[in-house]
Image (cartoon, helix red, strand yellow):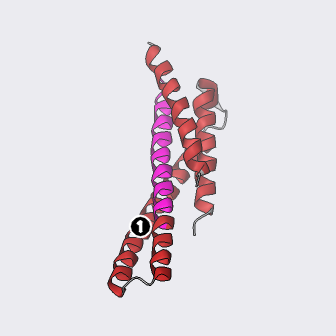
Amino acid sequence: MNNPHIALLSAVQANDTRHNATLRSQSRPTDPRLEQLIVYRAVLQHLLLQKAHYDHERELELRRLERFRSEGANERRLQIQEQVLKKAQGMLPGIVFKMRNEVDKLKRFLDMDKEQELRQLDTALYDNCVELLNNCQSSLENII
């Protein structure tokens, strides 16, 4: 079961590592807006990973519960598995709430940049953030 968001995050994180090494190697001070963009990117990457993890965990526990039911497991075992499933499902609303807030913040931040100054300062970072924003939005649309 390959999650496209996790595959994309792996690519983004590899790109992020190269980008941070480039920033550290430069001796000039960075624009505070670029630093803010880096923070938004890190937060959204983290939330996207968390959401992917708990989506996968929920699916796994649901399949396990269905398997227990089909095997005729005792009532106590089914109750315990239902509680495990509820805990996995219970993590998602908080993550989704935080992700929506961060997506909105990043959208507003990018919309404030009418003249595309941020993109001119660091094209790779800007494009990376736009791609991450699109991935987060598609992930939020696929909520079950």
Q: Which quadrant holds the C terminus?
A: bottom right
Along the viewing direction, whichever of 122 and 80 lies nearer the viewer: 80
* Secondary element type, mark 1: helix
Region rendered in magenta: 29-58
Looking at the rendering, which quadrant does residue 110 occupy?
Answer: top right
Residue at the spot x=46%, y=60% of the render?
Answer: 54
Residue at the spot x=42%, y=72% of the render?
Answer: 85
Q: Measured from the top left, where is residue 104 in percent x and y?
A: 55, 53
Query: Was residue 31 drawn as part of the magenta stretch in this picture?
Result: yes
| Kind of residue at disc 1 | Ala
Q: Measured from the top left, where is residue 59 in percent x and y?
A: 51, 66
Residue 104 seen in this snapshot: yes
Quick one: label 1, few (<14), some, or many (20+) residues within 10 Å? many
Q: Measured from the top left, where is residue 20 in percent x and y?
A: 47, 25
Q: Please, is residue 67 above or below residue 26 in the view? A: below
Would you name the residue on which mark 1 appears?
Answer: 88
Along the viewing direction, whichever of 126 and 72 lies nearer the viewer: 72
